[in-house]
Structure formats: C-alpha cells, structure tokens
Image (spheres, coloured by chain):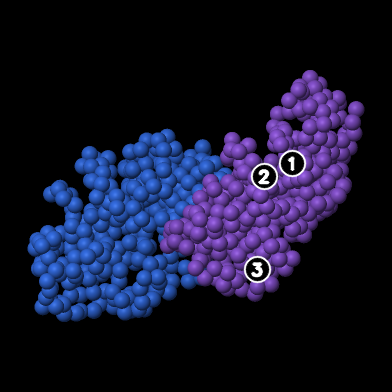
Chain colours: A blue, B purple
Amino acid sequence: MVQAKAWVLAKHFDGFPKNSNFELKVEELPSPKDGEVLLEAVFLSVDPYMRPFSRVHMKEGDVMIGSQVAKVIQSKNPAFPVGSHVVGNCGWRTHTVCNGKGLSPIMPDWPQDVSLSLALGAIGMPGLTALYGIEEVLDLKKGETLLVNAAAGAVGSVVGQIAKIKGCKVVGSAGSDAKVAFIKELGFDEAFNYKTVGSLEEALKKASPGGYDCFFENVGGPFSTAALPLMNNFGRIAVCGGVATYNDTTPQTGPYPHLTMIFKQLKMEGFMQTRWEHKNPESLKRLMGWLKEGKLQSREHVTKGFENMPAAFMGLLKGENIGKAVVAA
Amino acid sequence: MVQAKAWVLAKHFDGFPKNSNFELKVEELPSPKDGEVLLEAVFLSVDPYMRPFSRVHMKEGDVMIGSQVAKVIQSKNPAFPVGSHVVGNCGWRTHTVCNGKGLSPIMPDWPQDVSLSLALGAIGMPGLTALYGIEEVLDLKKGETLLVNAAAGAVGSVVGQIAKIKGCKVVGSAGSDAKVAFIKELGFDEAFNYKTVGSLEEALKKASPGGYDCFFENVGGPFSTAALPLMNNFGRIAVCGGVATYNDTTPQTGPYPHLTMIFKQLKMEGFMQTRWEHKNPESLKRLMGWLKEGKLQSREHVTKGFENMPAAFMGLLKGENIGKAVVAA
C-alpha cells in the first residue's frame, strides 16, 4: 500500500485562482494488478491551459488535470519496467496506479545530461505545440516575419527559436525586462516589454515596419486587436492560447475582426498539438536534435515540492516564470 | 462629344449613408483615341462592399467605385467591337472612355434568354465569391452542414444553392419572412428570420442540432458571436462580409473568439474573390451550366434609372432587396 497525495479542484475557479480553489487529499493506493504499474511523480507540469480546461474537463472534487514525468516503482506490465520513466496525464498526484494506457515511455536515447523535466517542456507538449503551430498551422516560410507573444514562456520561447532555425525574422513580446533580455539571448531579432512600451501598436510597428506574415498567438485580448491590422496580406495567425482572457469573470470584448480579415485576406486557426500526435516520435527527435546542436535552448522555472503546486500554477498565470514552469516533486 | 453622368462621393460616409454623401456630376467625354472605347452603362451594380471600401479606396470627390455591364458604342480597339457588351469596373458612370484594360467581354455564348445583368450577379462577382468561398476557402464536403447568413442576398443565395448541389445540408438566416420563403424555394433545408426568432442561439441550435461544419459569414457582429460556439470541431469559417458592422461610427465589440477557436480547432479565413480570378473563365462556365440546368436560380432586385443609384445602394444596406440589387441605367 502506498499513500498518494493529490491536489483536487475543490471549487471551480471564478476569476483568478485562489488557494481555496485547491484541496490536498491523501489516498491509499492498491498494489498494481496484472498489466498495471505504480508510478511516482518526479516532475509535474503546470500550464496555462489548465485554467480554461478546468471548466470543460473537470468537475469539483476531481484531481487537477496535468502531465508529469514519473518513475515506474512497481510493475506488472512488461512494457514499463521498474526504474524506467514515463510521461503521463496522471494529474496533480504524487503516485498513480494505472494500466499503462496513455503513458509514453521517455524517448529512447534520452541524453544523460538533459534533465527529464524537459519532457514536459521543450522536448514535450510545449515544444510540440510550437513545432506544429509553425509547421502545420502557419506553414512558416524562410524570410518571413513572425510575431509571438508570451514569448518568454514555455511555448513562445521555442516558437521564436524554431522560427530562427527556419531563417525568419522574429519579434517577441513579453511582460518584464528580464524576459525581454532572455528572448534576445535566445536570438529573437526584436523584443519588447508590452507592459512598459506605452503604445503597443507603435511598439509592434517599430519592431517590424514591414508588418507581420505570421503571428503565433498565445495571449488574445487587446494584444490581438493591436496586432491584427499590422498583419500583411495573406497573413496567418495560429491561435494557441488566450492567457489574457483566462481569468475573466465576464468575457472581455474587442472590435470584431471581420473587416480586417477580409481586406488582408487573413487566416486564423485555433489548434491543439494532439491533432498531430502521430508525428510525435519523429518530432521529439527533431527537437532533441536541435537541443543537442545548441540551436534550441531551454530555460525552466522549477518550484520545489509537490505541496507548492497551486502556488506554482498561480505564479505561472501571473507571469512569474521565465521559460517552462515545472514542479519537482 | 458625349455627356456622362457620374455619382461622386461628395463626403465620406459617417454612419449610415445619406443622400448628402453623393453628388451627381455631368462631364463632357472626349472621343475615344486609338486603342480606346466609349462605353454606355446598361446595368450597374450596387454591392455592400462599397461601404467599407469607400474608406480604403476612395477620397472625397472620386466617382463611386463599382462594376457595370456596358455596351461598346464607339470603338478604336478591335478587341471590343461596337455593339458588344463588357463588364468593367467603371464606377457609377453612365458613359466611360477607357483603353480596354480591365474590361472583360461578356462570356462567349451567353444565352439570349438570360439577362446580361446576371453578369453582375450569379454569373459574375457575387457568384464567383460564393463558388470560391465554398471550394477554395471552406473546401466544403458532401454531407457536411453549412450555415450562411444574409442568405437571400446576391452571394448568400448562390452559396446555399451550390452547397445543395454539393450534397450538403444548408441552413440560412435572412431578415424578413419573404426572404425566408425565397431561400426555402431555392432548396435551403432550414431557414429562419433572425429578426423575429427571439434567441438567435436557439434558432441556430434548432436548425441544426448536430452543429455546423462550415459557416459562410456575410454579416459579422453579434451573429458571429452566436454562431461560433455552435461550430463543430475542425469547423471552417469563410469570412466574406460583415454588413452588420459596415455602418458603425464606433466599432461594435464582441467577446474574443480565441478560446472557442482553440477548443474546437476552428479555422477562419477572410477572402476576396479576386484571389482566384485566373479561374474565372472556367468558373463562370460552371455557374452558367448550373443556371441552364435549373440547379441555380437567380433573383434580382432591379432599380430603374441611373439617378436612383444612391437610393438603390442605401436600400441594399437596409436589406430591402431579395437577390442581387442592380440598377438599370
């Protein structure tokens, strides 16, 4: 018998998440039966999507959704030997018994000098999101100019670097001077702190007087309104996130985008990386290849202690992290 | 010497167009020089796009933009013999001298029993807009469900009929009971009067409990907000017009669409039919073929007299027309 701790959604979020939305529960787990494994969390992911998905995929009392890197500590499933590591959507739990369905072994030949936590970041869901957004949604071409917001985040920082690998001009927006310095280090051509520029529109124009061919949208809200008229004809917008609106109690509104979309013949597409999961093995290899070549850098914001998961999540939504926010169990 | 009458944009529109925005001018035209022709307008088009385009493509004092079917009455250009008919973007003018650039001869073998005015409607720009929106933007597939608004208009009425030809379920929204009766006659599966349904959302749900795969958007504004959450996963939206917002003095606002677009992985694309004009000859033949087979019906709202062009245009923006609004010179 193992004692598992789990963070439960005690009450649906209303506005910005509070400590009282979460409750820590302890439960006794049975030993794994034939075909099952017992997992122990090593790194747990906190991601912005958890905020809007909580309304759609969870009810009060459910364990918070999310993925983790876990170690197999007991196994009655030969596909997952004891001591091996997996990525699984186990939620915010220290220990999980499951039948192996939905678990992905860490990719073979994971280098010893690369933290397994990156399987939740640049070499995991956020990295795949960046890659598929750029290749499958935007079809970004060499020489084009790309705009990305939340650019110092887990997805945005990878977006900008892949766009540089592809020979594009990259403009990034982020919410602190330290974040701006970070993405400039990563090789972004232009970067600005949207909180201090005064006029967002002027900052966007100055960063790229020739407009934008592609826009990787992580933020939504007024940023989207400012960026839309600066898109070039036939511009493409990959809608990946809308963190500016996740905590709205009443939905923010903005001007309807139709006329601008018609005049400039813009394409805007919402997406989730799961759509291309059949490509994941090959895509993760490419991401790892770029990492090993030094073309893709990864920074993490690590919070220690499973008990601090709500704090890590709320910090993420406040923009406290640079790079991928993870919790070390 | 010929006297030409022309309607000029005397003052930029501010809100809904008024008579004082227009001014009728008379000018003496020179005789055509070598390579030139003298045209006499037969039918003139009034279209919703003229309202938003006036801001972008016209300055005060310019002749109103627009296309017309005209007869060649003098010619020093062998490509356009006297007595032949052309479609040209001559603007709101009774007579035009031009060098033939941008003029399209009426398609060969135009049937004698089909009014030439249809070259401004179902067998012209609005018909091509419907066709390209369906085939190039939406990539509409047999068995899918399509929603179209402003469905009794020049574009919308063709959209619904082409979607029926392709074996789809078609739901149309229009602004009067007479329009609803008209589109039902055209073969639309479901149709409703958005002005009298009470809840637009309920009307949309009732018309297609299984949701919508494609949405041909002519209206924008609150209609788009109501329709978006009823799209099916991977739904496509062709943004062709936004007539609900054309006369705004301050832009209307609505909830940002990002989260719905992400959850449902929706694609939304603004377009103009000029993008595919290389396909026009073949496309016009297909439209004419459907017309001759009785699969495509056309209704026109004809205003008599060039002097009534502003009234015809304002009537169009009020939704007074069923089918294509044209002016017989």
Identify which amino acid the numbered label 3 is placed on.
Answer: Phe
What's the mark number on residue A98? none
Q: Is residue A303 left or right of residue A39?
A: right
Q: Earlier in the sequence, mark 2 or mark 1?
A: 1
Residue with the mark numbered 3: B192
Estimate the spatial distance between the alpha carbons at disc 2 and disc 3, rounded to whole Å.
Answer: 28 Å
Q: Quadrant of the C terminus of chain A?
A: bottom left
Estimate the spatial distance between the alpha carbons at disc 3 and disc 1, rounded to whole Å.
Answer: 34 Å
Circle 3 Cα neighbour tier, 10 Å, few/some/many (<14 / 14–19 / ≥20): many
Q: Is residue A112 above or below residue B110?
A: below
Q: Earlier in the sequence, mark 3 or mark 1?
A: 1
- Residue A311 is situated, as x and y percent measured from the top left of the image, at 30, 68
Q: Is residue A174 above or below residue A145?
A: below
Estimate the spatial distance between the alpha carbons at disc 2 and disc 1, rounded to whole Å.
Answer: 9 Å
Residue with the mark numbered 1: B111
Q: Are marks 2 and 1 in contact (CB under 8 Å)?
A: yes
Q: Chain of mark 1?
A: B
Identify which amino acid the numbered label 2 is placed on.
Answer: Met
Q: Earlier in the sequence, mark 2 or mark 3?
A: 3
Q: Nearer the viewer, mark 3 or mark 1?
A: 1
Q: Is residue B60 left or right of residue A71?
A: right
The secondary element bearing badge 1 is classed as loop
What's the mark number on residue B288? 2
Q: Is residue A112 left or right of residue A223?
A: left
